[in-house]
C-alpha cells in the first residue's frame, strides 16, 4: 500500500475487497453517538436521516439549523471522550499482526457536513450572500474534525497510517461551485485539516462522487495523497489520466454506474484495461477497492468476481503478481 501511494513500485496492486476476504487495510471509525427518535435515525450532529424503499445509505432530510446564520446553535460531537476510541487498539493490533495498512474513517468531513447541518440550498446561497455566517459554520465543523484527528493522533500516533474521508463535490456534469470560489472558501480549510493529518504522520484519502475533474486539482494542491473515484466513466478516464496520472494516487474500480450494474464482462474488462493504461503507473499510484453496497448500485456477485479477475490480470501484467485468490 505504501509503495503504491508513494510511487515506489508495489509488488502488486493494493486491494480493498473485503467482500472476497482480501483487504490490505484495516479500516475503522470512531464510535458515533447516533440515536433513534420516533423511528428516525438522528446522527451525532443532530441531522435526521431518511431512506427510500430502494436499498441505500439514505440522506439527511431534517437539519439542526434552519439557516447558516444559526451556526452558533450547532451542537458538535464531543471527540475528547475516550469511549470514542475504545475499539481502536484491537483493530490496530490486528493490523500489526497481519501487516496491514490502517485507516480511520471520517464521514462528511466539511462540505457534506455543512449542508447536512443547514440544508443544501441554504449553504449554496450562503456562500454568495452570507459568506461570514457560512464561513463561521465551516470553521465550527473544521474545529470539531481537528479535535477528532488529534484524538486519534494523541492516543495512537504513527500506528495510524491514514485518514479516509468523504466529501461529494459534483453533479454528473460539473462541480457544485466554481473553482475560484472553491479555492477562496474551501481550500484553506481543507489545507488546515490535511496539514494536521500529515503532521501526525498520516496519509490523506478523500472520496468524492460526481464529475469532480477540477476538484482533483484542488485536492492535490491541498495535500491529498489518494482520491477515491468510483465513477471513472463519468469523469472521463483518459482526461483524468492525462491531467493527474502520477500526481496523486487513485482508488477506484469498474464504474459503479455505467459498468457494474449491467454486469457485462466486456465492459468490466474494458474498464480495468483503461484504468491500467491511463491511471496506473509502473511505479504505482492505484488502489483497487470495492464500492461496498452492491444492492444500492445493482451489482451482482458474478460481476464482482469478473471485476476481481480482470484487475488481477492487470496487476500481474503491470507489477508481476496477481491479486491474492478470493477467499469468499
Image (cartoon, rainbow, N blue to C red):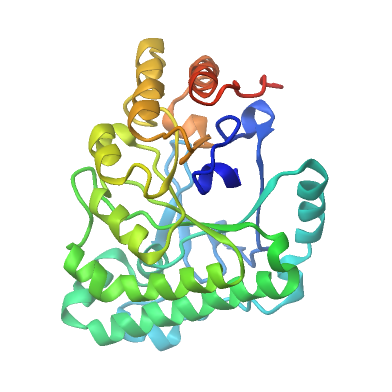
Question: Is residue 122 among the parts visible in the rendering?
Answer: no
Asked whether 144 or 214 is in front, the reply is 214
Q: Is residue 105 above or below residue 292?
A: below
* Residue 246 drawn at (x, y percent): 38, 44
- Given residues 211 and 213, the one toward you in this image is 213
- Residue in front for this viewpoint, 11 or 300: 11
19 lies left or right of 133: right
Q: Residue at (76%, 74%) from the top-left corner?
A: 82
Residue 156, given in percent of the width and then of the height, sits at 74, 67
270 lies left or right of 206: left
Closest to the observer, 197 or 49: 197
Does residue 9 appear to the left or right of 102 in the view shown? left
Residue 173 vs 222, above or below: the answer is above
- Residue 290's x, y, as percent? 53, 34
Tally of marks: 0
Quadrant of residue 199 within the rendered picture:
bottom right
Q: Position of residue 135 (x, y in %)?
A: 32, 82
Residue name at image x 32 percent, y 70 percent: 187
Quarter of the figure that contains the N terminus: top right
Name the residue rendered at 23%, 38% in the picture: 239
Q: Is residue 197 above or below residue 52?
A: below
The answer to whether residue 237 is visible is yes
Residue at 38% x, 77% y: name it.
Answer: 138
Name which quarter of the figure residue 63 lies in. Answer: bottom left
Amino acid at each position: 500500500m505504501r509503495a503504491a501511494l508513494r510511487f515506489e513500485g508495489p509488488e502488486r496492486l493494493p486491494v480493498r475487497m473485503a467482500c472476497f476476504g482480501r483487504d490490505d487495510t484495516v479500516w475503522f471509525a470512531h464510535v458515533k453517538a447516533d440515536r433513534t427518535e420516533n423511528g428516525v435515525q438522528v446522527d451525532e450532529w443532530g441531522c435526521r436521516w431518511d431512506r427510500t424503499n430502494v436499498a441505500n445509505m439514505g440522506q439527511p432530510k431534517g437539519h439542526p439549523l434552519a439557516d447558516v446564520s444559526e451556526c452558533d446553535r450547532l451542537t458538535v460531537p464531543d471527540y475528547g471522550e475516550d469511549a470514542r476510541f475504545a475499539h481502536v487498539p484491537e483493530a490496530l493490533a490486528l493490523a500489526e499482526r497481519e501487516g496491514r495498512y490502517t485507516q480511520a474513517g471520517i464521514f462528511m468531513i466539511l462540505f457534506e457536513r455543512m449542508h447536512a447541518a443547514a440544508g443544501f440550498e441554504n449553504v449554496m446561497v450562503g456562500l454568495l450572500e452570507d459568506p461570514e455566517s457560512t464561513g463561521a459554520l465551516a470553521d465550527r465543523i473544521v474545529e470539531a474534525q481537528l479535535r477528532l484527528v488529534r484524538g486519534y493522533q494523541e492516543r495512537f500516533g504513527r500506528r495510524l497510517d491514514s485518514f479516509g474521508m468523504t466529501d461529494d463535490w459534483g453533479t454528473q456534469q460539473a462541480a457544485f461551485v466554481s473553482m475560484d470560489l472553491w479555492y477562496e472558501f474551501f481550500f484553506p480549510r481543507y489545507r488546515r485539516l490535511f496539514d494536521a493529518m500529515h503532521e501526525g504522520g498520516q496519509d490523506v484519502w478523500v472520496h468524492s462522487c460526481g464529475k469532480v475533474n477540477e476538484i482533483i486539482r484542488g485536492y492535490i494542491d491541498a495535500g491529498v495523497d489518494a482520491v477515491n473515484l468510483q465513477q471513472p466513466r463519468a469523469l472521463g478516464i483518459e482526461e483524468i489520466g492525462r491531467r493527474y496520472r502520477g500526481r496523486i494516487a487513485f482508488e477506484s474500480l469498474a464504474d459503479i454506474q455505467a459498468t457494474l450494474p449491467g454486469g457485462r464482462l466486456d465492459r468490466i474488462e474494458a474498464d480495468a484495461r483503461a484504468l491500467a493504461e491511463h491511471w496506473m503507473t509502473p511505479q504505482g499510484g492505484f488502489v483497487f477497492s470495492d464500492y461496498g453496497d452492491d444492492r444500492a448500485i445493482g451489482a451482482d456477485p458474478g460481476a464482482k468476481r469478473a471485476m476481481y479477475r480482470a484487475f488481477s490480470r492487470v496487476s500481474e501484467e503491470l507489477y508481476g503478481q496477481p491479486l491474492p485468490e478470493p477467499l469468499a
